[in-house]
Every structure is written in C-alpha cells, then in structure tokens.
Amino acid sequence: DAMKAVNVKKREAALRRVGLITEAEAFCRAAAREGIGRTDVLRHFARAHDLAFRSLQRWIRAYHRDGIAGLIDKRRGTPGHGHPFSPEAQDRLKELYLHGNKPDLAACWRIVALEGKKNGWQIPPYDCVRRWVDKSIPLPTRVLYREGPSAYTAKCEPYILKDFESIPPGSVWVGDHHQLNISVRHRGRWIRPWLTAWIDMRSRKVMGHYLAPSPNQGTILQALRRGVLAHGLPDSVKIDNGRDYDSEMFTGTTKQKRRALKKGYLDEAGISGLFNLLSIDVSFAIPYHAKSKSIERFFDTLDRQLCKFVPTYCGKDASQKPEDLNEYLNSREAVAEAFTLETFAPRLERWIAAYDNTPHKGEGMNGATPNEVFATRTSKRMADKRSLDLLLRVWSRPLKVGKNGVRFRNVYYGQYNERLVLYQGRTVRVSYDPDDLRRVHVYDAETWELLTVAEQADFVRYGVAVKDEDLREAMRRKARATRTVREAAGPAARRRHARIVDLTIAALADRTRPEPEETSVDVQPVATPIDGQAQAARREERRQVIKRVAQRAAGAEGTDIGGLEVDMEALYAMNHPPELPPLGIVHPFEAEGETTPEQQRQVLKDLARSILEPRAEPREFGPWPDLPEP
C-alpha cells in the first residue's frame, strides 16, 4: 500500500535499486568463496555499474532495514531541483562543462562553487548538479560541444532514410578506400594494407575490390575494372570526396570546378571524365560519413569478422591496440608467420565470397543474402571489352617527350619509336595496365589521339659487355630514327642555298624603315693631344713601306741603282690608286727620244733618293712622281 502512494518514477527507481542490490549480494557471495573481501567486491561492482560506492552501501543498509520502502526517494519535487541553483551559476557551469577538452563535471562544479562564494550564487550539492546536467542539458548538445561535430553526426544527427527496396540491384555502386587494421609484410617491412572496394548499394554485394600497399587511382581502376567485367556497368556511382576518387581523371574536372557546377558555372553534360565516357552518373558523399556511404558498414563488418582474428591486429586507434603488439612484431616468430599482400589477398577473397552468401540484417534486405538480392536484377548494362580495357587503364599526368622517349616512373618508353622521335618537346599522356608495365599507350595531351604503343626501353648494365648483335640492332634503330627525322623535313631542307646571305640581307632591308631626314646639328669639336699629326703619321707609314719594298727588291724585276734594286711596279702601286693606268703604259723611258743608260741611271738614283730620304717640306703625291726629262 505504501508503494501505491509513490509516483511511478520513484517506484521504478526503487525497483532498479533492488535489482542492483540483489546482483551485488550474489557477486559478494561468489567472491567470498574465492577469499575476496566484501568491501573490495562492492567497490569493483560500483565502478562497473557507474555508481558511487557510498550510495551503494547506503542502499544495502536501507534495504536490509526497511525493505523496498527504504529505497524510495523521500525528496520532494524533481531530482536536481530540490536545492536552489542561481541562473548565473548555471550559465557559468555550462560555459565550463560544454568544452572540447571534456573537463570533468566535478572539477567544473568546484570552480563554480568557489566563484559562487565571491558572487553570492546559490550552488546545490554535486549530486544535485549532476542530475541537473542530465535533465537540463540535452544529450545532443553535450555530444556536439564536448565530442565535436563528427561525433554528433555519427551519434545524434538525423539522416535521410533510404528506401533500399526502390533501388534496382546493380544500378548504384558505392566506392571507397579503407586501411585494414592489421599489419602484413611487404618488401621487408610491416605495413597496413589498403582495400579499395565497390559494393552494390541495394544488395550490399561486393562488386569489385583491390588490395594494395597504398590507395591511388590505379587501385580504384583495378577494383572498378574487375567489377565491370564481372557484373556489367552501373547506372550511377556514389564516391568519396577524397583526393583519389574526386579527381579530374574520373569526373572530368577538378574539385574546385566541380563545386562550381552547383552554381551553374559549367555544363556537367559537357564534362568528359571517365565516368562520363562510360555513361555513369556521379554523386559525391560526405567525407567520413557512414550514413552517407553504406560501404563504411561493410568495412566495419570486415574488421569485426576477419581482421580481429589476424595475429597482427592493431585496432582502430591507440586505445584498442594490444599492449604486446610491438613486442610481437619485433619477434622472429611474427616475421616468419606473417601474412604478405600475396598470401592475405586469397583469404580476403574467400571471406568476401562467404560474406556475399551470408544473410544480411540491413535495411531492405529482409534476411536475404547479398547474392540472393543481386540475383533479382532485371537488366544488365554491358560495354565492349576492348573499349573497357582502354578506358579502365591508369592514366598519367601530362609528360614531355625527350630524347629517349617518355619517362614515366623512372622508366623510359619508346626510345627509338619513330612516332615519338618526331614528338620531342611536345606533351603527351600515357595509359598503362598496373599489372603489365612492359608497354604503355601514348596519347596526345590535348587531342587525346592515340599516337603509338611504346615499349619499355632496355637498360645496359654498367661494366657488362654488350653483344655484337644487340649493338648492331641498337645502331640500326638509331639510324632509322635519324632517317625519320630527315624525311620529315623533305628534300628542300637538304639543299644548300648559294644566295642565302643576299636573300637574308634583302629580307631584312625589306622590313626596315626609311632613313630619317638629316637635321642640322650643333657640331662641337673635341681637341686631342695628337691633333694635326694624322697626315705626318700616314706619310711616315708610306715611307716605311716603300723603304721595305726597296730593301727587299733584290732579285725582283726592276732596275739596279748603284747596288740597290727597285721594283718600279711596287713603288707605283704604293702611290697610285688602282684605276690609273699601269706603270708600263706611260713609262718615262718610253717618251720621245732616246736616252743613254747613264742618263737612265741618274734619273732613277734621283727618284730613289727622293723616296728614301725624308723631305723638309711635306709634298702630296700626284698621279705620277715628278721625274725630270731624260
């Protein structure tokens, strides 16, 4: 009867306390058989159930004394409102408690109590404040301000409910990267591998996947290629906003340009990305939003059902990492028994095959397996396999063609390729199959026209002799490349133009401007220390030249002058311009009348003396030397 007079909430609280007391007593009896003290057991029980140890002791004494009636809360009113709580103190407590550093509520209460003494605030006891926080500050508010927007989105934010049954199987694929929480050996060291996967949104079936040391465009394409070849093309894909998926290669534009599409700056139908070429619509998920991408739940299932049973499991974060993991990874046993990418991949394949045949409890699945739901699809989009092989290759960034072809990933392709020889200095793109890097497809970077299929260049090891046959073949290929370059110029480029200099000058003169008209200028003479000596210098230079000629005239054709032989033609050329008649035409000894040898000798002596001896007065040479009549 006493319980009927108590309100429902207090009656339910008392019943919960009875259940806790009964469980605690049973726990104490079991521990007592093991020789563990009652106090220690009750402390452990209180911590495990988030109770205050003294409150638990008080409830047990009251229950033993008064039964369930002793557990009824005798306080009046709503919990937390039995003591006055100043509004200023409430605001101050919210300011301290609702912080990203997640301060302890008890510490915040002590600070408010201290400030309340100075400001005259009314502060209730701590237990009352704790109940006030639970009642007055909503859980979403506490999560948002104390744990951050990501935690709020995951725990409290409403999300759009999808009608999965309205989605045709195989029509919408979801893709993402995920780093597995295990370590495997790769090239002599431990790594955490990455899984790139595409799943069907309706059936949750894994359409294609690829395991690699790191995520990139190549892993995306490999996973997509496997799915498309096995199950056909989807109508649309939902992808992450990450750097690899959200790239120009897939969407036909950069992330900045894609965001501008929402404002109407670009025509999405005109963008030629990879998905556009495959007639696949693209939508972008919110990064790291599990509700936005159902594939996140698949990765969680993979972690729980497979990765946690791998000896090198490291957990999702530091709090879940096994304490002895580092010690185990450094042991020889771990290295000897470790999985590699190659040995773990088939095990992942088998697990995925089992997952696709396991009943699923997700929305719209109704307990069916992914394969059973996927089998209900009514249409399948297919494309030509050869076209898919070309489209679903990995593409490079623009590359420049050099002397040895295209350098990609530190390897040269098309070293002697005749098409690439003519493309030196121009920009190209290459596409390749990650599983076969012996050759690449080379395309023009602007027109995307296929230029050639370039083979990987051969490297010659330093210090190792080259076979004669290989050397001759290399020389033949070099000769063919050179011949291709010459033939590209045509026959006209090989002619030598005799008048090219004159044509060059004439072409330059044809583009010159007319000379400007001369204008009167103020001439300012500049005096130098050697003014007036130019004529004397020229006369001295002429005298020295004639003197050297006269001294070297021995054996030359001329006339002997007392042991000195003078070349008259040379003397004449030194003093007369070339347009005058030769000396022999008007020679003084061919004038009218005859002269004796003695007279001729005297005339020549006087001529030589006048030339070799400096004059007191400067004299200008005329067209003829002044010779006396014979």
Image: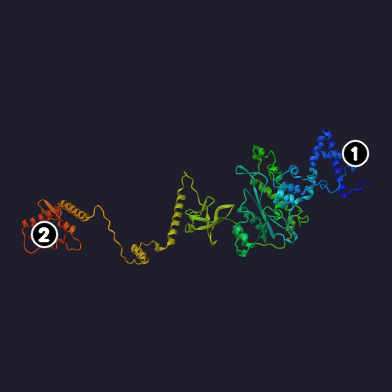
Quarter of the image with the C terminus is bottom left
Query: Which label number is shown at residue 65?
Result: 1
For label 2, the crowd category at 10 Å Cα-Cα, with few meaning under 14, some 14 to 19 and many 20 or more, is few
**Residue sitting at the far top:** 35
* Amino acid carrying mark 2 in the image: Leu
Residue at image coords 79%, 38% = 44
Residue carrying label 2: 627
Residue 548 image position (x, y, % from top left): 18, 51
**Residue that lies at the very extreme toward the right in this rendered image:** 1
Q: Residues within 10 Å of mark 1 (few under 14, many from 20)?
A: few
Q: Nearer the viewer, residue 135 or 393?
A: 135
Secondary structure beneath dot 2 equals loop
Residue 179 in sight here = yes
Residue 173, percent across and down?
A: 68, 58
Q: Is residue 606 left or right of residue 171?
A: left
The tag on residue 294 is none
Determine which quarter of the picture holds residue 114: top right
Q: Position of residue 301 (x, y in %)?
A: 72, 50
Nearest the viewer among 25 and 191 is: 25
Q: Which label lies toward us, 2 or 1?
A: 1
